[in-house]
Amino acid sequence: MKLSIEKQNEIINRKKKLQEVQQLLKQEFVGIDKVIDELIYLFESWYLFSEYQLKPLIINLWGMTGIGKTSLIKRVVELLDLDDFYINLDMGYYAESGNIKGILTDEFDHLLGNSGIICFDEFQLCRTINEGKNEKNRSNSRIIWEILDKGKFTVFDKPRCIYRLQDLKKILKECIRRNIEAENGMIVKNKESFINLVDKNSLILGMSYDFYNYRNRVKEEIGDVYLFPRNYYDDIYKLDNAGFDDVTEYEQFIMSKQPNELIEYIDTIIRIGNKPKEYDLSKFLIFNVGNLDEVYRFSSDMNPDNDADWFYNQTLKININDIKMALQKRFRNEQISRLGNNHIIYPAFSSDAYRKLIELNLNQFKHKVQNMFGLDIQYDSSLHNIIYKEGVYPTQGARPVLTTLDRLIESTIGKIINDILVQEAEISKLEWLFENSEHLIRFYNGNAVPAFEKKYPADLKIEPHRKIKKDDKQASVAIHECGHAIVAALTTRILPVKISCYSSVSNYAGSIQDDTPTDMMTKKLLKARIAIGLGGILAEKIVFGEDNISMGSSGDILKTTSMAIEAIKEDGMGSIPIAIQYPSPSTNSFFRYKEKYDNEAYELIEEGRQTAEDILIRNKELLLKMAKYLLKHPSMNKATMLRYFRKYAVEEWVRTDGFIKKEKYFGILDYIK
C-alpha cells in the first residue's frame, strides 16, 4: 500500500474508536440501534478518509421531534473530540433572516480546504416552494444549495477595511508631499505636520488616537505617533497573512515600511480585497436534520392516549421514496438531487423503547443518589408504569418523558432525604412504589423488614383525566367512534386495530386506528375513506337524531372535503383527468376554476355519505352493542371487535369469508396475471 505505516496505524485506531463509540451510543440512546448503525456506517468514510473527498459527504436525518436526531450528532461529535470542527445552524432562524454566509465565513475561515462538520438543523424550514407550490424568494439560503452541490461557495462582499485603506492611501501620498518620514513604524520627521494631517482627516480615518496616544492627557502631551493606524492591523491581516506566523510578525512587517512602500502594499491589499473569495468545504461532512410532516403525517397528533406501537409500525413503512416525494412539496427537483441518497429515517419510539428510556434514566438517577447519599434504590414496576402513563406522548419522543421524570422523581428525593435526617435513621436502601396516586417509600436499615414507610404526594397531570365517565359526552363519543370503525371495516373488509373512546385531552374525545393501506390511493379506496370520515357524524344522527348531532366532526368534514376536492382537481379522478387551479401569475400549467368539478367533488362526498348511512342503518344493533362496551371500557382492541362483528353484523360475509389483510385489498396484480 502507498499509505505510510503511521497513516495505516491512524486509520486502524480511528476505526477502533468509531466502533467503541457505536456501542456506547446504543447504551445511551434507546430505540434507534438501526439508525446508529447506519449513521456510523456513513460517518466512517469521512472520519477515516475525509482528506480524499472531492465533494462534501451529505447525510440527511428525518424523524419526529424528540427522537434524538440532533442530540445523536452532537454526542458523536463529542465522543470523537470533534467539537472544534463542528457548527450547528438552526434553520428556523437562518433560513429567514440570519446571516448564514457570515457565520460560515467567520466560523470556518481557519478550516478552508480542511475537514469540518456542519449541521443544518430544522432543514425543512429552508423550503423554496410554498404550500401553494409556488417558488419562494429565498436568496438568503442560496449559499446552502451551493455548498450541498459542490462544497464550495463564493463571497463577493468587499471588506469594509478596503474603503478605509483607500482613504489612508490619500493620507500617505500627502505624507510624501510633506516630506514626512518614519522609522520602525514611528514618525521621526515632521511629526507636527503629520498630526495636523490626521486630525484634519479623523472623520474619514477614525479617531486620531489610532495614530498616536498621549503621554500626559491632562497636559495633552503626545507620545508615540504611528505612520500606520493600529486598529487596521487585524482587518488587513485577514486578507494577507500568508508567510506570517501571527499578527505580531505582520505588524513588524508593516512598521518597516516608508509611506511610498506602504502605498504600493495597500494597492496590493486592495486588489486582494476586491477579488471574490472562494470557500472550500469539499472535505466537510454535512448533516441535514429535520421533520417532514408530509411523510410523518400523524406527527401533529398530541393525544397521549394513542398507541405508541401503532405509530412505531407506521413509521417503519416510510422509505426513501416517501422522503423524496415529501421533499418535492418543499424543494425543487434539482435541490432534492443535491441532498443525495443518504437518508436516515427515524422510527417513532415503540412502547418498549419508551420503557427502556424510563429504565435508563431511573438507573442514572439511582447511581446519582448512590454516589451522593450512599442510598440504594429499588424501583417497583408501579413506578415505571405511572411514568409511562404520565410521560408518553407517542408523537413527541423523549422530552415529555424526561420532564415527567424530573417532576415525579427529582422533585421527590429532596423530601425523602429530609425525612431520613429528621428520623436520624441509618437508612441504606429505599424501595420506591406508586400506589393510589402517591409515592410510597419504604426505608430499610439493613433488615428485611422496612424501618418505616411514608407516602408523598405526586403531581399528576394526565392520569386523573383518564377516568371513564358514563355521561352524555361519553355516549356521543362512543357512538361517533364506533360509526367510523364499522364503516371502515365493512367498506374495506379490513378490521381497525383499535377504538379509543376517551382521552385525557379535553378537546380530543376519541379515535380509531384503522389499518387501511397507506402506500397507494385508488378511487375505490378514496370512496371508502370518504365514507369512513363521515361515519362518525352519521352514526350520531342515526342513534340520537338530527338535533343531537355534536359539533365534534369538523376535522372529519374538513378532511373528507379536502380529499374529494384534491382527487377531482389534482389527481385526475373526475370525469376528465385534468388539474384545476385558481388563476395564478406564477404558473400557466393548470386549467382554471370550473364549477363542474366542484359538483363532481360534491357528488363524491354524497356517494360516501350514502354508503356510510346505508351501512350504519343496516348495522344499528352492532353500533349500539359496541358503543355500550365502550361505556364500560376505555378502548376496544381488534380481537374484541372481531367478536362483535361476527355476532352482530348483518353482512353474512363477515362470518363466512371474513376480513382480509390490507396487503390483499387492491388485488390489482390479479388483472395482469
Image (tube, helix red, strand yellow):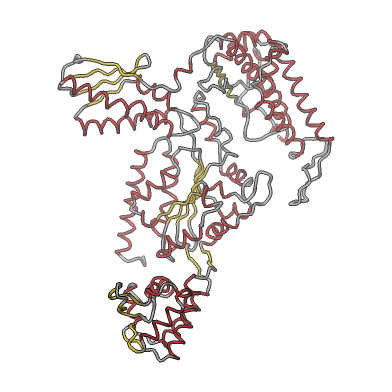
Nearer the observer, 31 or 509: 509
Figure disc tally: 0
Relative horizontal placement of residue 672, taking residue 35 as reference (left or right): right
- Above-or-below relation of 639 to 101: above
| Residue 220 coordinates in the image, percent (x, y) | 32, 76
Q: Quadrant of the N terminus?
A: bottom left
**Residue 492 visible to an observer of this rendering:** yes
Q: Position of residue 575 (x, y in %)?
A: 83, 35
Which sits in the foreground, 400 or 69?
A: 400
- Give the residue displayed 43% in from the left and 24% down from the top: 390
Q: Is 659 situated above or below 197?
A: above
Which image quadrant: the C terminus?
top right
Query: Does 133 appear above or below 626?
Result: below
Q: Is residue 618 left or right of residue 240?
A: right
Q: Decide which of 474, 570 is in the foreground and name it.
A: 474
Quarter of the image holding residue 455?
A: top left
Asked if 433 appears above or below 52 in the picture, the reply is: above
Residue at figure coordinates x 51%, y 12% from the top left:
468
Q: List the single residue furthest toward the front.
A: 219
Q: Judge whether residue 264 can be spotted in this image.
A: no
- Residue 634 in picture, x, y percent from top left: 52, 15
Residue 188 is situated, as x and y percent measured from the top left of the image, at 32, 87
**Quick one: 608 or 436, which is closer to the camera?**
436
Residue lying at 58% horizontally and 22% vertically, measured from the top left: 511
